[in-house]
Image (tube, coloured by chain):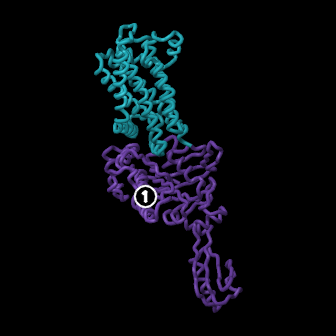
Chain colours: A purple, B cyan
Amino acid sequence: MMNNIIEINNLRKIYSNGNEALKGININIEKGKFFGLLGPNGAGKTTTIGILTGLINLTSGNVKVDGLDILRDYKKTRKMIGLSPQEINLDVFFTIKELLVFQGGYYGLSLKESKERVDNILKDLGLGDKINSKVRQLSGGMKRRVQIAKALIHDPEIIILDEPTAGVDIELRHYLWDSLRDMNINDNKTILLTTHYIEEAEILCNEVAIIDDGEIIAQGSPNELIESDGESNINITIDKWDKNILKDYEISYKDNMLSIKSKNTERDVPKIINELAKSNISIHKLNINKANLEDVFIKLTGKKITDDK
Amino acid sequence: MINRPFLTLVYREVWRFLVLYKQTIMPGIITSALYMVIFGQALGSRIKLENNVEYIIFIIPGITMMSVISQSYANSSSSIMQAKYLKFIDDYLIAPISGFELSMSFIIGAILRGVINGILIIITCSLFTNLTIANYSLSLFFLVVVSCVFGAVGVIVGIVAKTWDSVGVLGTFVFMPLSMLGGVFWSIDMLPESWAFVALYNPLYWMINGLRYSMIGVSEISIVFSIVVSIIFAIIFTAIASIMFSKGYKIKS
């Protein structure tokens, strides 16, 4: 509890059109975590981080950042947060350097500090040669990186990224993943990422909360969630079948294909192979469809995470 | 309030209009020079005023104020509209800056654009006339306070307006007529009694006459009342603009 850098308590948001976007959610994020807020479009992810950063007014509940209330102590809490919004929102009037220097100033950095940080961050993000370019001269991927540079300029404790890889190519996606992992591990930044890419959450996050229709329906490490609510499929092609074996498993058998559901494939696969061998059943082929967070989501909500609300 | 985030925002606002000086400063100077030539020199000699002031001198405060009003209003309204349009207004809303500081940064940007325009127009006009300023500090006071009023109005309109069109409409259909009817080119004694009565209800009439008094030492009305009206409007609109930013009216969900 003491190490929670973000505490969201019973947070509700009802928009003026009556839409209840958040139905009293609770999320605690430990300092140094790479935390994923996973859910389909319209689930309440952007509303949650909008409230956290001050873009959206909450209806009830409270949010604390490092023990400080985001409404009462907003000047302190906002300095601790860097946000990269989902939509590109860059001022086209200034050069990249100018707009980042201003951004640093909004968070209290001196001109000198800001300029130094801009040079370093742009170099790190591979934009060193674009420092004097204007936004209109940049490609989509470069704009996305500038967007992330804006979130990092004041060296915040918490980096919040709303769908950072939405619409970016695979190369940039992997580049961003590496950069974010580096910030999390080497700079000890707490990262809150919203995404509806399962792979992204599984690869990057050491904890995820699954949100659907304004409610948190599960929270834990990806492995814990998959173990508790996901089921892998072990598919084995065999030469014959004996229905008296493997009684402890949920099995389907058709045309020499044995399909077995498993919550823990590492434990079950050797056992299954042993039992088949004891019954003199030959294995021609074996493959495992590992459960992922998508399966967890489907099990908990009855729909795919990529389905819009 | 005087902190680095606030000063950065002010700096940004000022830099924005200084870089765009061809759009933000030059037009006011050129327009006022044309007014000087056309209204002052071509037509002015045929107009006699009761207080023996030359017509060309009489219209300088009005021309100045007309430009100050439009430039200060344009500065804050267009800056906020652009920030809304390109969505970087979110950068301001998530920064550690209060609603009051936010609105004041836009208003100060507007004040500086209004005052710079006003001073340059007065200098330009003085090239065509033998204008001598009666009271420098009072003149500066009116330039600052009126820029503040319309800078704050620009903030309010910038926040509320959904399109650029509605920002322009207010300028064209409200502020321009109010300025023209506020005594830019005429003295109240030139008007029929009924219109003169209407003019007294136009706050711009009091502001223009306040500047006229401070510049040429002639006023048709109470200078104290001019000062009070200008300050009250500045306070009211600044307060409204600050509350709107603090509450996130129309800009936060």
Q: Which quadrant of the view contains residue B114? A: top left
x, y percent for residue A108? 38, 43
Subunit of label 1: A
Is residue A205 visible in the rendered structure shown here? yes
Is residue A181 visible in the rendered structure shown here? no
Can you say whether B78 is above or below B141 in the image?
Answer: below
Q: Residue at x 60, y 85 (%)?
A: A273
Residue farthest to the right, as pictured: A244
Q: In the image, A262: left or right of A72?
A: right
x, y percent for residue B69? 43, 26
Q: In the image, A24: left or right of B48?
A: right
Q: In the image, A281: left or right of A137?
A: right
- Name the one closer to the observer, A274 or B70: B70
- Name the one closer to the observer, B120 or A58: B120
Residue under circle 1? A141
Can you say whether A124 is above or below A112 in the image?
Answer: below
Q: Residue at x 51, y 63 (%)?
A: A200
Q: Amino acid at mark 1?
A: Gly
x, y percent for residue B171? 48, 29
Q: Which quadrant of the view contains residue A27? A: bottom right
Can you say whether B129 is above or below A129 in the image?
Answer: above
Helix, strand or loop status at disc 1: helix
Mark 1 nearby-residue class (10 Å; few <14, some 14–19, many ≥20): some
| Quadrant into which the C terminus of chain A falls | bottom right
Residue farthest to the bottom, as pictured: A280
Q: Which quadrant of the view contains residue B148? A: top left
Can you say whether B51 is above or below A114 in the image?
Answer: above
Q: Residue at x 55, y 57 (%)?
A: A37
- Name the one closer to the observer, A207 or B219: B219
- Tally of marks: 1
